[in-house]
Image (cartoon, rainbow, N blue to C red):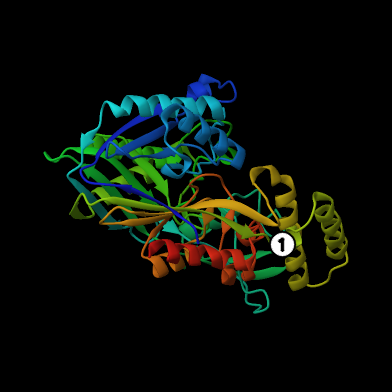
Amino acid sequence: MKSDIIKINTPFSAASRECSILDVSEDKIDPEKIKDTPYVRIILISDKETSILVMSVDMGIFIQSEIDTIYGVIENQCGIPRSHILLCSTHIHSAIDVEPRAFGKLIADTAALLQDELVQVEHISVRQCVLANGLMFNRKYDFPNRDLGSACIMFNDDCEIVDNTFDVTRQMEKYLNGLGTDLSFAGIHGKVLIDKECDQRLHLVTFESGDGRVISAFCRFNAHPVVTSRAKVGNFTSSDFPGVMSKRLKQAIGCPVLPLNGAFGNTRALNHEYSFKEAKRIGEALADSVLKGKNISHGADPIVIRHTTAYLPLKDILHGSRKDIEKRLADTEEQLDASNGPVEKKTLMEKKDTMTFFKDFTKWFRIDKNAVETDFRYCDLGPIRFFTISGEPLVELASAIEDTSGALVIGNCGHDILYLPTPEEAAKGGYEPSCCIIADKGLDMIVDIARELSK
């Protein structure tokens, strides 16, 4: 496997800033609809010969063409190549859309300013905590019928498996009030499994000067930010609880803190309601928890990043032209109308959902020979290692990557290639596996790539 190796030698320096993205919005925004300012937070790390940019933006996703434009502007203006740029979105569901060229220029202009603000890094410290049970959870629906197994369920009430009448919020309120987790929909009965497998860890990484001042920082968390989802609270702009967490951490340590989302594909905060007040409660709880975590300080060793571009094979039902997929979709809909029994109906529904989702969002991706292009990076910072993915990793896939490479996963780095389960989770079905476009072979490839890049 061919990979680029980027090395930042010691001594190296860092600097950080945060910039509002309101002025580079693609659409005009009503000021009264802005609940809190969305930011892009930027860290520049340089040893004078080589520079890397690490960024986190309060947005939902980027698509391939947007990333190409943004990275192109940065490279042309700053000379920083694509492989040296890590642009992550927090995946909030109340975000604005940015105009890619203007956004790229904002980053490039800020990177130029950061060149004059670089401070030598003497230590990289990692503060880790494990959240109390119940703050984050991985929710599945457990069917007693073994042929159906368990299924991941989407977090927004307007997008559920089998039928759209299943009200997740009502059921979660029932759980929170101690009324049990028995559920029934579409004639199928089962139970919600709370806290099945979930990454409850938070990691706060700080770059520190010789006098102990924090120069730059980022915090890895693991959750779908849907507490201020527009489907729930209305057409407002908000950075949800990741923005609250970042703001509180900045107040505590004195510099911008990048929120980086990790294993979030099927994990969410256990919110008592959908509201800005609840986002504030959760964000502050996350920040306060990690600030009390165990601290491990480490000398500033050279930073090594291994980058590769790979082509992950698509599911068989997504092969061919758009016309081929539309024909396959029509045939599946006919079979669905004639189907009997929950097992057959569930299988056909998920097959239909996969093709519909792919057909509607083909422009998000770069497809070549029935495979989707994506970037991966293995980042060795000395006391901690990360593996970046262009997509929404489920916790089981992130666990497999960590087991094989020793690296923590960062999701939505670059463009979004949708949900990424393990083949075993994909076989169980449900919303997230239905919206996965990658074949089992491609999902296994991701773990193999992490292993190879870690060597």
Few, some or many residues within 10 Å of mark 1 (<14, 14–19, 20+):
many
Residue on which disc 1 sits: 350
Q: Residue at x 34, y 37 (%)?
A: 43
Drawn side of residue 44 relative to residue 152, left or right: left
Q: In this view, does 280 lie above or below 139?
A: above
Measuring from the top left, give residue 71's x and y in whole percent: 50, 36
Determine whether the residue tagged by mark 1 lies in a helix, strand or loop: helix
Q: Is residue 414 above or below residue 185?
A: above
Measuring from the top left, give residue 446's x and y in whole percent: 52, 62
Q: Residue at x 53, y 40 (%)?
A: 60
Drawn side of residue 236 relative to residue 43, left or right: right
Q: In which quarter of the image is the C terminus?
A: bottom left
Q: In this view, does 92 lie above or below 169?
A: above
Residue 151 seen in the current view:
no
Measuring from the top left, give residue 366's x and y in whole percent: 65, 47
Residue 316, quarter of picture: bottom right
